[in-house]
Amino acid sequence: MSENPPDHLMREDTGPVDIIDVESVVASVRPEVRPTTFLASETLNAVLGTKVRIASETFQHTGSFKYRAGLAVALHSRAEHLLTASSGNYGAALALAARHAGKKCTVVMPASSARVKIEAVRRNGATVDLVETHTMSRKQRVEQLRAELHDVQVVSAYDDPFVIAGNSTLGDEIFEQEKPDVVVVPVGGGGLSSGIVTARGRARAATKVVGAEPLLANDAARSLRAGVLCHDERESTTMCDGARTPALGQRNFAILRRGLEGIVEVSEENVANAVRLLFSAINLKVEPTGALAVAAVLQDPQRFQGKRVTCIVSGGNVDAELYAKLLRG
Amino acid sequence: MSENPPDHLMREDTGPVDIIDVESVVASVRPEVRPTTFLASETLNAVLGTKVRIASETFQHTGSFKYRAGLAVALHSRAEHLLTASSGNYGAALALAARHAGKKCTVVMPASSARVKIEAVRRNGATVDLVETHTMSRKQRVEQLRAELHDVQVVSAYDDPFVIAGNSTLGDEIFEQEKPDVVVVPVGGGGLSSGIVTARGRARAATKVVGAEPLLANDAARSLRAGVLCHDERESTTMCDGARTPALGQRNFAILRRGLEGIVEVSEENVANAVRLLFSAINLKVEPTGALAVAAVLQDPQRFQGKRVTCIVSGGNVDAELYAKLLRG
């Protein structure tokens, strides 16, 4: 299979050669995460015009799939201190995972971040380092801290073989239960989608993996079309804050260019429609990024008609104010 | 055990002597319902000051525990046509259950019911009979239809031994996984709470069962205190529409007066707080009635401190408009 994971993770075009024992990473992560929540509904099927199963990570530790990635990193890093930049789910997930693994963790966040997100990272035991982003970029601050801190490792939220292996455990759960015709997965930096492709390889499933990306942040779709890594010129204004990443990671692109069937570019309107649909049809609270896969089915229904489709809902963390606004339409 | 179900269900003070084979009802219902969704969260524990497990029925067929009851009735009724009055979850549940069992179903609803609720009952295959409640009560209309329809059975949403047995399957799931110190359960007509007491008897668990009732519709709490069945004088204005029932059923009262540890009377403010807490701490969308058990822990924290508490979230069906309003506080 072209997406066989160890092969991929060792390809030279993915940057430094990564030699990691994927099976042992997966085996260490799996017992520590909450199983994903599979949901189905006749109402949802009727609206979407096809047979859909939801794999929801909204009840995962820290409310998103990112805990799978954070745990893979925290359990296997040799450093005693983990450092990342995140204003969203990865910060909270890495913080909790580091605590679980007995490591220190520092998360660089914009000073403008929502209080609840800063508090979530602190509550999970990490140090929050606030940066005034108009005076210094988060990346610059991470470099400063890397030089200052002892025995520290800087961790990407997606472009990291442990992250990809950790996220692949969600794919294992999906393929163990049932091998659907299609899995639809949100695409930001490509950490989750490349994990699903990796798991598909292990499961030797004929399932197609389709990405779901906001049209307003369609760097991944453009990258697949062009065959080279494309970047968004500026940070996207999409409400899907988990998919504002300006470009896929190198490792992720290497896996996705061969492993993805395609990417559906989703309008903001369909993201909002999907948030409302999941609320009304299956009582599921999701964040906008988490609604991308269902939004992709609304965006391009023909593509999925007559198929058994699994839509991954990647997370549920959304401010009450924004959620109330989306519900009111 | 005082709450041994066959004994209870055959007591003369519970109305006509009911001889039903509880075990076979339970065995027929269990494989057809979705397992309840158990959730836990450190954040939730921190706020509630005790160790809480949520048993959520929001992902059950038709979005509430009522499908368990509807199915028990539909699978075991000898009539070919089931008739009930409901403006809420029981109508949708009985409709779907009747379709599953190959029976006809008619649901009497106020003409003023929300369109989405009427549509939900119709979508599940039942006939909706709309009644102008200022000219005729729902009960009168049910009596009219009982006389008109062929081979019809009028079904209560709570005061029915099959309903109680069906709902007891949720209790079985709770006690099989872990026997908590306390189970907290919303109380309306007493259909769910008496099912949980029944299941506790089967499990021979030392677990205490505590009811959670809106202070604005506290007929059950008054009934337990008085030792006789008390009625609310008029339909309550509580936002917990599933607990507006004016009185416990006869059978339910007979079970609850001996089987319940007590009832916490919950303020509307704490219901709203619980809805918001479940949204923010565990990404769970619940209807106000579904939030009652968690609201009871907020209302009387001392009662639950240091205990292993299971809170039942009975359902998730709430209008987007009301939910958005609750989120904004």
Image (spheres, coloured by chain):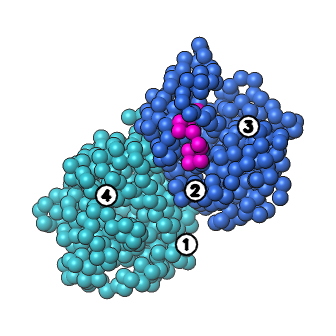
Chain colours: A cyan, B blue
Give the side of residue A261 with respect to residue A161, left or right: left
The answer to whether marks 1 and 2 sit on the same chain is no
- Per the image, the residue denoted by label 2 is B28
What chain letter is assigned to the residue under label 3? Answer: B
Q: In the image, what residue type sits under mark 2?
A: Ser
Report whether mark 4 lies on the same chain as mark 1: yes
Of residue B4 and residue B80, the one placed in the foreground of this image is: B80
- Sequence-earlier tag: 4 or 1: 1
Quadrant housing the C terminus of chain A: top left
Q: Are marks 2 and 4 in contact (CB under 8 Å)?
A: no
Image marks 4 and 1: residues in contact by CB distance under 8 Å = no
For label 2, the SS is helix
Name the residue tied to disc 4. A309
Task: Give whichever of discs 3 and 2 has the lower sequence position.
Answer: 2
Query: Do the residues bearing badges 3 and 2 touch, measured as CB atoms within 8 Å?
Result: no
Q: Amino acid at mark 3?
A: Gly
B12 above or below B25? above
**Magenta highlight range:** B74-84
Q: Secondary structure at mark 4?
A: strand
Q: Could you tell me if residue B66 is visible in this image?
A: no
